[in-house]
Amino acid sequence: MIPNLAHVEWRVVEGKAGESLRTVLVAGAANLAIALAKLVAGIMSGSAAMLSEAAHSAADTVTELLLLVSVRRSGRPADRRHPFGHGKAGFFWAMTAGIATLVGGAGFSITHGVHEISHGEELSNLTPAYVVLAVSFVMEVVSFTKAFSQLRGEAARHQVHPVRLVRFTSDTALKAVVFEDAAALIGLLIAATGLAGSQLSGSALWDGAASVAIGLLLVVVAVTLIQSNLSLLIGQAAPPSVESGIRAVLLAQPEVADVVELLTMMLGPGDILVAAKIDFRDEDSAAGVEFACDEVDRRLRDRFPGIVQVFLDPTPTLRR
């Protein structure tokens, strides 16, 4: 099982940006329609939870736009000024999307909810709000199903649990959509609970508390995505099991006596750089070392298609 996991942990989409782009487009269209419907329902009902959900969906729409930029920019080929490609641009724009969720969605939801709890607010006709919540839930399910279908398909292909795959993948666009759609579904349930509680009790406390809860949910999602993308942006290594697989390939080469040092770095969604200091056997000639380096390069790329750069440095160990 470990070789399969190592093969896929950083590469959730074999077709590169294509499938992720479609996933982002579906999520963006759904969020835009939902944001407008929630805004109208929130104004009509005076519900802080509904307005928070409108802000949530609006922030998600902005997020999808930034993720579209992320997918496009990360897919640009390497050039003279950027010999390692533009993959890290995808991490930057995905992190920016997380910041937009944190500031736009979470900030508004928490402050508006606290205001309603402290000042109170009379709720009016809640029927449109319930209708919008129900329709929004269906639309969010469609968006989440699209994202989870992509995730589950890749997980099944490589015999990895979807939760484990989304935890390690460097496909930040897919990861963001899965996290945000899941948060949207939970947020809708929280908003419905807040509306029902306020309607039954006659107190706006329930609605305000639901707004704050939605904001805190967005904080968790945003911080998770920001931390994930920041780690990738500053040079995150490949997962440990991937590095173990790379080391095994290096040591399997007959000319290699030891791996002195192995360094890896994610260059972009699905792309990995390998740099290693190798102690070659003393009896090997210069030509033999050159052949071994070329063979190791080929074997690494065959086993891990995500590897795009390999640098090997012949280095004797201290004991020698």
Image (cartoon, rainbow, N blue to C red):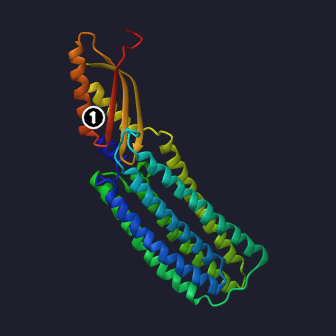
What residue sits 37% from the left and 26% below the top? 276
Q: Residues within 10 Å of mark 1 (few under 14, many from 20)?
A: many
Out of 287 and 242, give the one closest to the viewer: 287
Residue sitting nearer the eye, 257 or 308: 308
The residue sitting at 62% across, 87% down in the picture is 44
Image coordinates for residue 72, horizontal then vertical, percent: 39, 56
Is residue 239 something one can see in this rendering? Answer: no
Where does the image place residue 74, in percent across and percent down from the top left? 40, 50
Question: Is residue 319 or residue 276 the one in the foreground?
Answer: 276
Residue located farthest toward the right when viewing the structure as drawn:
119
Q: Where 248 sits versus 26, above or below? A: above
Tell me what residue is drawn at x 76 percent, y 79 percent: 120
Residue where numbered disc 1 is placed: 300
Quarter of the image holding residue 307? Answer: top left
Residue 220 screen position, x and y as percent: 58, 58
Task: Classify residue 188 as left or right of residue 211.
Answer: left
Q: Is residue 275 visible?
A: yes
* Amino acid found under the numbered disc labelled 1: Leu
Residue at the (26%, 37%) spot, across then down: 301
